[in-house]
Image: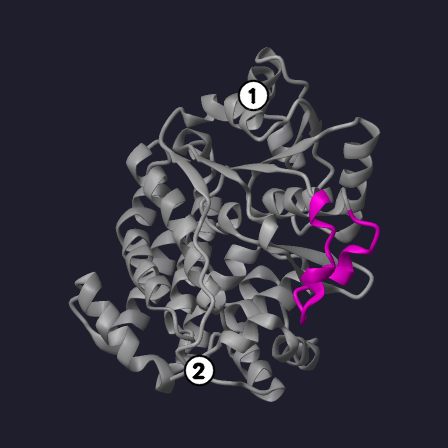
Amino acid sequence: MNYSANWNYPTNVKVGAGRINELPALCKALGMQAPLLITDPGLAALPMLQKAVDNVNASGLRCGLFSAIKANPTGKNVEDGVDYYKTNKHDGVIAFGGGSALDAAKAVALMVGQSKSIWEFEDVGDNWTHVNVEGMAPVVAVPTTAGTGSEVGRASVITDAANHLKKIIFHPNMLPAQVILDPELTVGLPAMITAATGMDALSHNLEALCSPFYHPMAEGIAVEGIRLVQEFLPRAVADGTDIEARTQMLVCSSMGATAFQKGLGAMHALAHPLGALYDAHHGTLNAILMPYVLLANRSAIEQRLDRLTRYMGLSETGFDGFQNWVIDMRKQLGIPHTLADININDEQAETIGRMAVEDPSAGGNPISFNAEQYQQIFLDAVNGKL
């Protein structure tokens, strides 16, 4: 075991119902006078978003709105956001929405002060050291889904549409300076999106736990994050107005993104190329892939999962107990069992295997799979072979 490691922990987080009312004060604390609220088109039309904009404007600030963002944000979306920010003379960013909106907003805040292409800041080698830090805009993050944990992340996943690749754009200062976790903002989330984003939070905690790198603190967070999913995700899906369940799932989402600094794995290594090629929902992809990846990793993770099942209080312990819990949970939440169920076939299997082995997330998998092994996991997930 290599005990040499670099550890980072989240930022200033305000948790609780009604905390969105503190948004103007948090913007002012960061020196903003003209924040740009960046969100997706669906949220832009909702009353809760207009209320947030109105509250910021009523405080004496000048709040703009940009929402031209795809479900899997592209480099072009970020460029357009940067142009809007500069044209309207904004001086900070409010990242408001699900993972896609938060990722796009964080990328805009990074790029407003750069002269290089966004792709030059991909999370490879020391690319991040080439960022003009002084030019970056401050960010307040307000998640409205409980899944990605992007509000406490130092990176954004942006699609390079020309090459059909999802790329991770990274800089330590991309971590938002202020975060609001207000469960009331997630109450209107449809049951299926609640389920898929919640399973995404589970995948983050689970892959962090199983990653072979040394980070006991992240491991501890991951274990409790998984237990929170066990207790509160079914409640949040069954009753969207359950404020306790909504709060706990927002917290669990942030916990997952904190824990996965320890590493992700094959679920994400496959979900990223599938999202880029098929424009499919990231959380849904992770939820479908989960048991197939667990099975492929079985020999390396059995001991960890045995401990986990005892902490969760499952009646059936060990690998099989956890795998059966995952499958039962997916069924209860209405998550599809195969990739074929969401219209993904095996035509690009070889390409997906190659892209998965090259994805940065593959480096955190407990077993170092080659492209052929990734291709087989993908085919098993298409065909429902467990």
In the rendering, at what x and y percent does residue 44 appear?
64, 29
For the residues labelled 1 and 2, say whether their Cβ atoms are less than 8 Å apart.
no
Q: Which residue is mark 1?
A: 47
Verify whether residue 242 appears in magenta: no
Looking at the rendered structure, the kind of residue marked 2 is Ala
Task: Give how far across and how far down residue 226 sits, in percent.
Answer: 32, 59
At label 2, counting other C-alpha atoms closer than 10 Å, the crowd grade (few under 14, some 14-19, many 20 or more) is some
Residue that label 2 marks: 296
Element carrying mark 2: helix
Q: Secondary structure at mark 1?
A: helix
Q: Residue at x 56, y 54 (%)?
A: 154
Q: Is residue 66 above or below residue 339?
A: above
State the residue in front, 178 or 132.
132
Depth order, front residue of 304/161:
304
Q: Earlier in the sequence, mark 1 or mark 2?
A: 1
The type of residue carrying mark 1 is: Pro
For marks 1 and 2, give the CA distance: 45 Å
Q: Where's residue 145, x and y in %?
A: 48, 42
Q: Considering the image in quadrants, where does the C terminus appear? A: bottom left
Chain part drawn in magenta: 114-134
Q: Is residue 320 visible?
A: no
Q: Is residue 191 left or right of residue 58?
A: left
Identify the image quadrant of the N terminus: bottom left
Q: Nearer the viewer, residue 10 or 221?
A: 10
